Amino acid sequence: MNALEQEIINKFNELDEDAQQRVRAHISKTPQSGSSTFDYETWASDVEAIRRRMGANAETQAVDVVGILRGIRDGEDE
């Protein structure tokens, strides 16, 4: 255990019981390193739905990304 971990444990022990419960609840909601809650199937479905909507919209215009970036770089307002 490194010094930071020990300091966190010491500070945690200084908290009252309610505060400790809130910290535990927060930590339990935080994804662990290496774990993933990303749902590829849902993401792919959402992307496909957006693609279909864009294709169905005949008035869809191309965005000049380079022009936008140049405007930002040069400090131009839209």
Image (tube, rainbow, N blue to C red):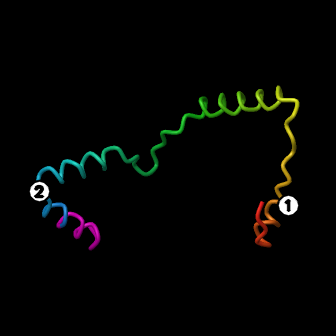
Residue 18 x/y as whole percent: 14, 50
Q: Quadrant of residue 39?
A: top right
Q: Which residues are magenta?
A: 1-10
Question: Please, what secondary structure does the residue beneath circle 2 have?
Answer: loop
* Up/down of 70 relative to 38, above or below: below
Measure the alpha-carbon separation of dots 2 and 1: 55 Å
Q: Is residue 29 above or below residue 46?
A: below
Q: Which amino acid is tagged 1?
A: Gly
Residue with the most extreme front position: 77
Q: Residue at x 39, y 48 (%)?
A: 32
Pick whichever of labels 2 and 1 is earlier in the sequence. Answer: 2
Tags 2 and 1 touching, CB below 8 Å: no
* Main secondary structure type of the part rendered in magenta: helix
The residue indicated by pointer 2 is: 16
| Above-or-below relation of 51 to 27 | above
Image quarter of residue 44:
top right
Image quarter of the C terminus: bottom right
Whether residue 2 appears in magenta in the rendering, the answer is yes
| Rendering coords of residue 30 (x, y %) | 37, 48
Q: Which one is closest to the eye, mark 2 or mark 1?
A: 1
59 or 5, which lies in front?
59
Q: Is residue 8 magenta?
A: yes
User: Where does label 1 land, which residue?
Assistant: 67
Under mark 2, the amino acid is: Asp
Q: Nearer the viewer, residue 26 or 33?
A: 26
